[in-house]
């Protein structure tokens, strides 16, 4: 794949382009929130496996992030360093926590969608379309070395996800980013795009993509909450759901609802899969 040119000066309409990329990220997070049934996760129907947050908490968080994602796109267009992206991410997290009263609703999504918006901005500034292949290339060329270094540092961190990754030998979010999000680009977004191409309704396609994420992702936060057995159980039931025909199969919604009740009873919450679903929804909007 040919190398990207160095980012050029922003064109006159760049502000509108950055707004469009950022707005797509916020809408994608709303797409994820509005999906139901969604095993163990917060939706407009209920709070899933959570007692400290509900849909209104997520909406406050979304409103607080409305300027963050365009800012990531502008930073990417300007050829900003990873340190600058991290600074924007920390500022976005602080606004999120103020809006939610200290509850972490979207920290993982800020990281993933922030990087994707930056990569799309980098591409747009060079006159390139943010296709899936081009986005992965932009991530590697723009911030690949920094992401690898961050993943190495994170391996020794004391966060819940990092501790779970070390304890169980799992792939953490940092490694996923350092490898340009293989689960997103090779499993979750293809599942969403294929479901839509087969004529499934958007809600069905998002459910298909969510289960693809649950099946493929080493969700370290889930492993922290429920141990390796809980993670493997979620992966197994997700694979079974897909093997039985997925969201297009007769009775799929009823099976998903039954799994939702089971996950709530067991306090299982595949939040990493929810972030991958949101990222896939964003990609479907901007990177076809």
Image: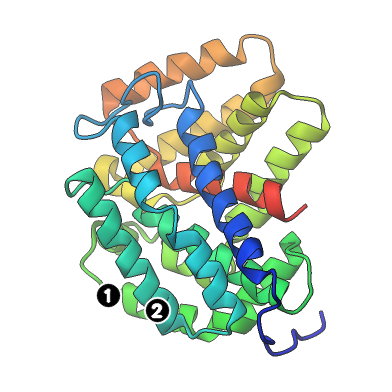
Residue 65 x, y percent position in the rendering: 40, 53
Task: Return the mark for residue 33.
Answer: none
Residue 74 x, y percent position in the rendering: 55, 73
The first of marks 1 and 2 along the sequence is 2
Name which residue lies at 50% across and 47% down.
26
Along the viewing direction, whichever of 170 and 187 lies nearer the viewer: 187
Label 1 sits on residue: 156
- Residue 89 shows in the view: yes
Label 2 sits on residue: 150
Check disc 2: other Cα within 10 Å, few if <14, some if 14-19, many if 20+: some
Name which residue lies at 68% across and 10% down.
250
Name the element at disc 2: helix
Residue 215 x, y percent position in the rendering: 54, 40
Along the viewing direction, whichever of 65 and 281 lies nearer the viewer: 65
Name which residue lies at 55% across and 36% down.
210
- Residue 244 shows in the view: no
Q: Is 234 situated left or right of 203 in this image?
A: left
């Amino acid at each position: 794949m040919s190398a990207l040119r160095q980012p050029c000066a922003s064109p006159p309409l760049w502000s509108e382009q950055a707004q469009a990329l950022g707005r797509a990220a916020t809408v994608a997070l709303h797409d994820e929130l509005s999906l139901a049934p969604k095993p163990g996760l917060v939706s407009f129907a209920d709070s899933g496996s959570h007692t400290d947050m509900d849909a209104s908490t997520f909406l406050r968080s979304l409103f607080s992030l409305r300027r963050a994602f365009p800012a990531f796109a502008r930073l990417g267009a300007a050829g900003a360093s990873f340190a600058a992206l991290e600074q924007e991410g920390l500022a976005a997290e602080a606004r999120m926590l103020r809006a939610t009263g200290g509850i972490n609703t979207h920290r993982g999504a800020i990281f993933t969608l922030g990087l994707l918006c930056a990569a799309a901005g980098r591409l747009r500034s060079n006159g390139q379309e943010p296709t899936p292949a081009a986005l992965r290339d932009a991530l590697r060329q723009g911030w690949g070395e920094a992401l690898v270094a961050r993943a190495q540092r994170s391996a020794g961190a004391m966060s819940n996800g990092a501790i779970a990754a070390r304890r169980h030998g799992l792939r953490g979010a940092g490694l996923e980013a350092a490898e340009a999000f293989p689960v997103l680009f090779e499993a979750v977004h293809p599942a969403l795009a294929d479901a839509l191409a087969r004529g499934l309704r958007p809600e069905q396609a998002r459910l298909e993509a969510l289960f693809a994420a649950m099946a493929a992702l080493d969700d370290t936060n889930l492993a922290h909450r429920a141990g390796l057995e809980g993670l493997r159980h979620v992966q197994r039931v997700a694979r079974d759901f897909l093997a039985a025909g997925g969201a297009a199969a007769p009775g799929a919604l009823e099976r998903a609802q039954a799994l939702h009740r089971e996950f709530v009873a067991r306090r299982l919450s595949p939040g990493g899969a929810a972030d991958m679903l949101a990222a896939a929804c964003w990609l479907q909007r901007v990177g076809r």
